[in-house]
Image (cartoon, helix red, strand yellow):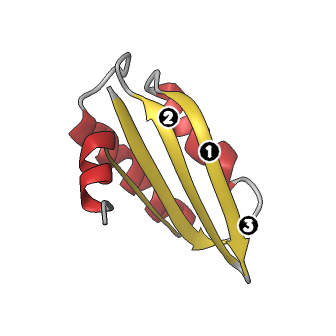
């Protein structure tokens, strides 16, 4: 199953590394990344494969939110089909 991870917050060194290492610890594969910095705001969307994840999606979401809080970022994950349905025009 694939999921979308979104990350928003003040730009600083190490954001991508921190998010990717949190995902890697749970055996989540990063398939694609799009990121940009607007002024000093960092934004990133990642397509990830969670089919080999070591924990359920809800627990992974909690881990990412916790890591985001530690870094001063908003990190969220949701299934790709739900993300697409919510953003369909």
Q: CA distance from mark 3 to mark 1?
A: 17 Å
Q: Secondary structure at mark 1?
A: strand
Identify the residue position indicated by label 2 in the image.
23
Across and down, in percent, residue 65 comes to 38, 56
Could you tell whether 71 is left or right of 4 in the image? right
Dividing the image into 4 quarters, which one contains the C terminus? bottom left
Q: Compare residues 69 and 35 and report the one nearer the observer.
A: 35
- Where, quadrant-wise, is the N terminus in this rendering? top left
| The quarter of the displayed image where residue 36 is located | bottom right
| Residue 80 locus on image (x, y percent) | 33, 41
Judged by depth in the image, the label closer to the viewer, 1 or 2, is 1
Q: Secondary structure at mark 2?
A: helix
User: Mark 1 touching mark 2, by CB under 8 A?
Assistant: no
Q: Looking at the image, which residue is at 57% across and 72% down?
A: 9
State the residue lying farthest toward the right: 13
For the residues carrying marks 3 and 1, which lies nearer the camera in this image? 1
Q: Residue pushed farthest top?
A: 52
Q: Position of residue 31 (x, y in %)?
A: 56, 30
Question: Label 2, label 3: how many angstroms apart (C-alpha)?
Answer: 19 Å
Residue closer to the observer: 8 or 62: 8
Q: Earlier in the sequence, mark 2 or mark 3?
A: 3
Mark 1 is surrounded, within 10 Å at the Cα level, by few (under 14), some (14 to 19) or many (20 or more) other residues, namely some
Q: For the view shown, which residue lies furthest in the front direction?
A: 89
Disc 3: CA contacts within 10 A as few (<14), some (14-19) or many (>=20): few
Residue 40, compared with residue 70, is above or below; it is below
In this rendering, position of residue 41 left or right of residue 19: right
Label ID, residue 12: 3
Under circle 3, the secondary element is loop
Q: Find residue 33 and name its label.
A: 1
């Amino acid at each position: 199953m694939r999921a979308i991870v979104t990350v928003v917050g003040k730009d600083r060194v190490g954001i991508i590394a921190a998010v990717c290492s949190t995902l890697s610890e749970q055996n989540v594969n990063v398939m694609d990344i799009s990121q940009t910095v607007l002024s000093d705001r960092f934004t990133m969307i990642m397509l990830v494969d969670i089919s080999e994840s070591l924990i359920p999606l809800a627990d992974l979401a909690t881990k990412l939110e916790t890591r985001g809080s530690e870094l001063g970022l908003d990190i969220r994950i949701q299934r790709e089909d739900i993300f697409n349905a919510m953003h369909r025009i």
